[in-house]
Amino acid sequence: MHKRYSSGSTWEATIGYSRAVQAGNTLYVSATAASGADGAIVGDDLYTQTRAILQKLGGVLSDAGFSYKDVVQSRLYVTDVANWKEAGRAHGEVFGDVRPALTLLHVAPFIDPKILVEIEITAVKHEAAA
């Protein structure tokens, strides 16, 4: 079973991707930036953008019937590696007890130079014990 979840962005159809795709008990969520409903970037520092993205990802998880507790892998793509600890601090506030596998990558600037971080996650829904 494949179920696709959309953010409603016109980019999804243009580029040919989904905000998230569920395959069985696994949810794959595309890299996400800190853009608001109006498309404007939220925040001008790594901490604020990371918090905004994680809040947005929480909504994606919830819409698909998952939660932060189901996240098994997180990937942070940052343009300013010198300040990576700010992104890490925000990530730790959400995932401190969950402790998913983490990849932190230093990347070239994104299409919009206001974007300082994007986050991609994978979640697995564990079946209840019988």
Image (tube, rainbow, N blue to C red):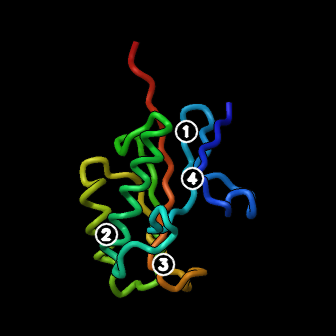
**Element at label 3:** loop
Of the numbered discs 4 and 3, the one sitting upstream in the chain is 4
Is 29 located above or below residue 89 in the figure? above
**Residue kind at label 2, given as amino acid type:** Gly
Cα gap from disc 1 to disc 4, whole angstroms: 18 Å
**Element at label 4:** loop
**Residue kind at label 1, given as amino acid type:** Thr
Of the numbered discs 3 and 1, the one sitting upstream in the chain is 1
Quadrant (top left, top right, bottom left, bottom right) of the C terminus = top left
Q: Which residue, as the protein is rendered here, is positioned at the far top? A: 130
Cα gap from disc 4 to disc 2, whole angstroms: 25 Å
Residue pointed to by mark 2:
88
Residue pointed to by mark 4:
7
Viewer-nearest of labels 4 and 3?
4
Quadrant (top left, top right, bottom left, bottom right) of the N terminus = top right
Cα gap from disc 3 to disc 2, whole angstroms: 16 Å
**Element at label 1:** strand
Of the numbered discs 4 and 2, the one sitting upstream in the chain is 4
Give the class, few, some or many, for how many residues have Cα within 10 Å of label 2's Cα (few <14, many ≥20): some
Residue pointed to by mark 1:
26
Frontmost residue, 127 versus 38: 38
Residue 79 position, x and y percent, is 47, 83
- Horizontally, residue 33 falls left or right of residue 46, namely right
Of the numbered discs 1 and 2, the one sitting upstream in the chain is 1
Of the numbered discs 1 and 4, the one sitting upstream in the chain is 4
Image quadrant where residue 81 sits: bottom left
Viewer-nearest of labels 3 and 1?
3
Image quadrant where residue 126 sits: top left
